[in-house]
């Protein structure tokens, strides 16, 4: 499974809409493989959701996201896990092992019901 | 700080409508007032102790954090082009002010961020903007707003309309707006530039032809009059048509029927005709270059579109409009235009009118992807011209030349209303008059007060 996270140094970018870097990784048998980074700017690229789809991304983990971007991503049948904040490695490890990210990494003020 | 002062400060912080939070040196939230809870939708209990970027969630957090700049440079910052995203995925426009947080001994213990919800301001701005809009046209000039006011009535009638205006003033947009507001709106709207085609081609385009009408006419071709049946046709540059075409057009308007080339029987035409021209048809009638009977037939309702140089107050509005639509088309995030670049645009005369301004913004979009459009993004001819105008006199009297340029630009912007110009320049009206006389600025024979 190919997964992407919007990252800012060692942490998840707080806002997807103004993020610049995607961490892309494969998850196989609970192991993280082939980590790569890609520059991207959703505010500049009208077709960013299509590109995510072309990259084969199945799951996207990100911080706060506005409705427009959320709709565009989900329309590509990419599973979106938004409003996540914290250390990227910890989040990736936890997710690879099949553990839920919510509520541990859920941003404050966000309801667990939506996840 | 004694207990009384501390309590007073807390009461004030809790009662103001601006959100306020404080952070320590590790960017963890130490306090979060009631308004901050209300604007972000996050309770104080959930916010305290968390990293500010996970609570505030602003587009500035990652690269342009004002609080970080304050902590690094030791001074306050204000930012107006920010937004935060709440847990319902809604962008909330905000303004942000940051400053240092010090203890009673003057030691820096963190930072304070004050933010204001601008949703209502944005909503009102949008409503105001909508009141300046009609179809795809936008204007705050009185002349255009008068047209906007009568346009629904003009649209509901089926009368022929004559639209006058220089090239690039939006004649086709007005025609389209009339069509869209009319009972014919579900049927086609077609436009043709009559001045661009020779008579035979124009007739074949408008009336169509039958198979065998001329060599290579192997099958029937319907013309625009048939295509736009029950709709609207715009005959642009009507003043450039030949006398023989004018005769044919007059007959069609009167008989409500047309004869395709090669046909023997006339076809009924239920179509609304809108004519447009950049010429003065009544003068052409006097000079016998336009048929008087056709002029009276098409001049039932006349709408005169002012050139852009007579409604310079529209430039900022139009620039915003073009930026918003180009952002959508090109998928860019240009936020606006800076003051210098806008000043250059305001000082230009626009012989090509709104179309020219649109092309200038389109040019800027090629060079600018995000942030504000600056002088560097404008076409060099425009910036050079603006420099030359200053430099012509600048070699001897640079200050005088610059002053003339600025006063002229503001006079144009205010449609030569001296009072409004003086207000914009921040000087008294009598001072402006003195400067106009001293600098030898020649004014046109119009008085902006009566035009506004």
Image (tube, grey):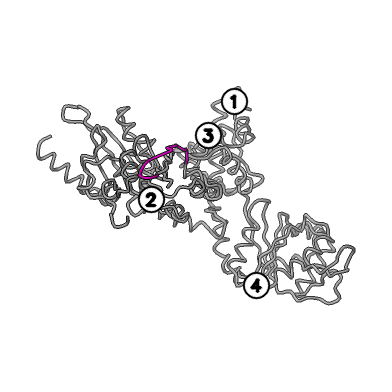
Q: Name the residue under label 2.
A: B91
Q: Which mark is residue B394?
A: 1
Callout 4 secondary element: loop
Of residues B417 and B11, the one drawn nearer to the viewer in this rendering: B11
Q: Earlier in the sequence, mark 3 or mark 4?
A: 4
Q: Which chain letter matches label 1? A: B
State the image coordinates of residue B204 (x, y, percent, origin top left): 81, 64
Seen in the picture, residue A111 relative to B369 is either above or below; the reply is below
Seen in the picture, residue B183 relative to A44 is either above or below; the reply is below
Q: Which chain letter matches label 3? A: B
- The span picked out in magenta is A28-40
Q: Which chain letter matches label 4? A: B
Asked if badges 2 and 4 are on one and the same chain, I answer yes
The residue most toward the right is B215
Q: Earlier in the sequence, mark 3 or mark 2?
A: 2
Q: Residue B435 carries which label?
A: 3
Q: Name the residue under label 4.
A: B158
Residue B320 can be seen, yes or no: no
Asked if badges 2 and 1 are on one and the same chain, I answer yes
Residue A29 colored magenta? Answer: yes
Residue B28, quarter of the rendered image: top left
- Check disc 1: other Cα within 10 Å, few if <14, some if 14-19, many if 20+: some
- Check disc 2: other Cα within 10 Å, few if <14, some if 14-19, many if 20+: many
Q: Which chain letter matches label 2? A: B
Comparing labels 3 and 2, the label whose residue is closer to the camera: 2
């Amino acid at each position: 499974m190919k997964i992407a996270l919007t990252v800012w140094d060692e942490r998840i970018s707080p806002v997807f809409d103004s993020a610049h870097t995607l961490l892309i990784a494969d998850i196989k048998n609970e192991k993280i493989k082939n980590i790569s980074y890609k520059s991207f700017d959703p505010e500049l690229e009208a077709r960013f959701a299509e590109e995510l789809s072309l990259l084969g991304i199945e799951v996207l983990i990100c911080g706060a996201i506005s409705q427009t971007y959320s709709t565009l991503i989900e329309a590509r049948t990419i599973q979106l896990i938004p409003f996540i904040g914290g250390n990227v490695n910890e989040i990736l490890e936890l997710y690879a092992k099949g553990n839920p990210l919510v509520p541990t990494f859920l941003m404050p003020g966000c309801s667990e019901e939506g996840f | 700080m004694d207990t009384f002062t501390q309590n007073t400060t807390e009461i004030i912080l809790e009662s103001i409508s601006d959100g306020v939070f404080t952070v320590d040196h590790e960017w963890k939230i130490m306090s979060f007032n009631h308004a901050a809870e209300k604007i972000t939708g996050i309770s104080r209990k959930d916010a305290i102790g968390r990293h500010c970027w996970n609570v505030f969630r602003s587009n500035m957090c990652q690269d342009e954090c004002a609080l970080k700049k304050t902590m690094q440079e030791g001074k306050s910052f204000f930012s107006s082009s920010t937004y935060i995203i709440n847990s319902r995925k809604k962008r909330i426009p905000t303004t942000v002010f940051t400053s240092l947080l010090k203890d009673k001994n003057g030691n820096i213990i963190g930072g304070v961020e004050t933010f204001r919800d601008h949703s209502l301001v944005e909503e009102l701005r949008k409503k105001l903007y909508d009141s300046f809009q009609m179809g795809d046209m936008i204007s705050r000039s009185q002349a255009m707003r008068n047209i906007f006011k009568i346009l629904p009535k003009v649209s509901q009638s089926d009368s022929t309309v004559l639209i006058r205006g220089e090239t690039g003033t939006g004649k086709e947009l007005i025609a389209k707006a009339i069509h869209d507001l009319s009972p014919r709106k579900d049927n086609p709207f077609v436009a043709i530039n009559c001045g661009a085609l020779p008579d035979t081609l124009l007739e074949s385009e408008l009336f169509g032809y039958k198979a065998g009408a001329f060599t290579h006419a192997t099958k029937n071709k319907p013309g625009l009059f048939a295509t736009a049946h029950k709709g609207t046709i715009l005959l642009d540059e009507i003043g450039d048509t030949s006398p023989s075409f004018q005769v044919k057009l007059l007959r069609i308007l009167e008989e409500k029927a047309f004869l395709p080339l090669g046909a023997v029987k006339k076809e009924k035409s239920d179509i609304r005709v809108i004519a447009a021209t950049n010429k003065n048809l009544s003068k052409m009638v006097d000079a016998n270059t336009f048929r008087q009977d056709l002029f009276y037939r098409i001049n039932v309702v006349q709408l005169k579109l002012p050139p852009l140089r007579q409604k310079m107050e529209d430039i900022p509005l139009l620039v915003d409009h073009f930026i918003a639509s180009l952002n959508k088309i090109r998928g860019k995030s240009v936020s606006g235009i800076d003051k210098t670049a806008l000043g250059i645009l305001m000082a230009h005369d626009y012989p090509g009118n709104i179309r020219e301004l649109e092309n200038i913004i389109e040019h800027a979009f090629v060079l600018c992807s995000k942030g504000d459009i600056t002088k560097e993004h404008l076409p060099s001819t425009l910036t050079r011209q603006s420099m030359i105008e200053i430099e012509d006199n600048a070699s001897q009297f640079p200050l005088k030349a610059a002053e003339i340029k600025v006063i002229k630009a503001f006079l144009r912007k205010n449609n030569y209303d001296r009072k409004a110009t003086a207000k914009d320049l921040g000087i008294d009206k009598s001072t402006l008059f003195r400067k106009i006389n001293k600098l030898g600025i020649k004014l046109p024979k119009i008085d902006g007060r009566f035009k506004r």
